[in-house]
Image: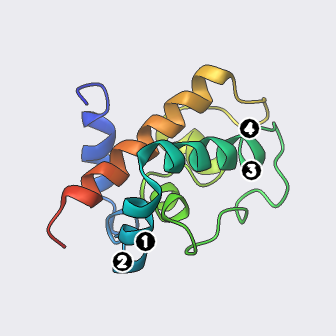
Amino acid sequence: MSDLTPLFNRLARSPFRARFRLGAKERQYCWDKGAEVIDQHAADFVARRLAPAFPTNDGKQTPMRGHPVFIAQHATATCCRGCLAKWHGIPAGFDLSEAQQHYIVRVIHFWLVQQMNSQS
């Protein structure tokens, strides 16, 4: 995590980002599906909803609930191109590279692991 520590420290100081948590239903979904499937869902969502230079409905393309990955995306500021630019330094207006997509999935995965290992 060492390279993600500064990011997660900044996210923790954001009242909006820090309010996101997995509920019982989302936790169970993660347990039922397993990390590999959830990571694939994250990769698919990122590829379809974030990777294009100008995503459809940018800024509104990620629901606030309905899937653990959606919640993680809001918690980690990986929900839209504006948040990616502001929080992650990934500029809007360009297709995301494979490396950038993998980074985003890694950030989402890490947040989900933290949530699954927390007591709440």
Tag count in the figure? Answer: 4
Q: Give the residue type at disc 3.
A: Arg
Label 2 element class: loop
Q: Which mark is residue 26?
A: 1
Could you give the CA–CA distance between mark 3 and mark 2, rounded to whole angstroms? 23 Å
Label 1 element class: helix
- Taking the view exactly as shown, the residue that stands out farthest to the bottom is 24
Please give the residue where the numbered disc 4 appears in the rendered image.
51
Q: Give the residue type at disc 2.
A: Gly
Could you give the CA–CA distance between mark 2 and mark 1, rounded to whole angstroms? 5 Å
Q: Give the residue type at disc 1.
A: Glu
Q: What is the quadrant of the C terminus in the image? A: bottom left
Could you give the CA–CA distance between mark 1 and mark 4, rounded to whole angstroms? 25 Å
111 and 74: which one is in front?
A: 111
Could you give the CA–CA distance between mark 3 and mark 1, rounded to whole angstroms? 21 Å
Nearer mark to the viewer, of 3 and 2: 2
10 and 107: which one is in front?
A: 107
In the figure, 46 relative to 6: above or below? below
Nearer mark to the viewer, of 4 and 2: 2
Could you give the CA–CA distance between mark 4 and mark 3, rounded to whole angstroms? 6 Å
Label 4 element class: loop
Label 3 element class: helix
Circles 2 and 1 in contact, beta carbons < 8 Å: yes
Name the side, left or right, on which 27 lies relative to 59.
left
Crowding at dot 2, Cα within 10 Å, few <14 / some 14-19 / many 20+, comes out as few
Q: Which mark is residue 49?
A: 3
Circles 1 and 4 in contact, beta carbons < 8 Å: no
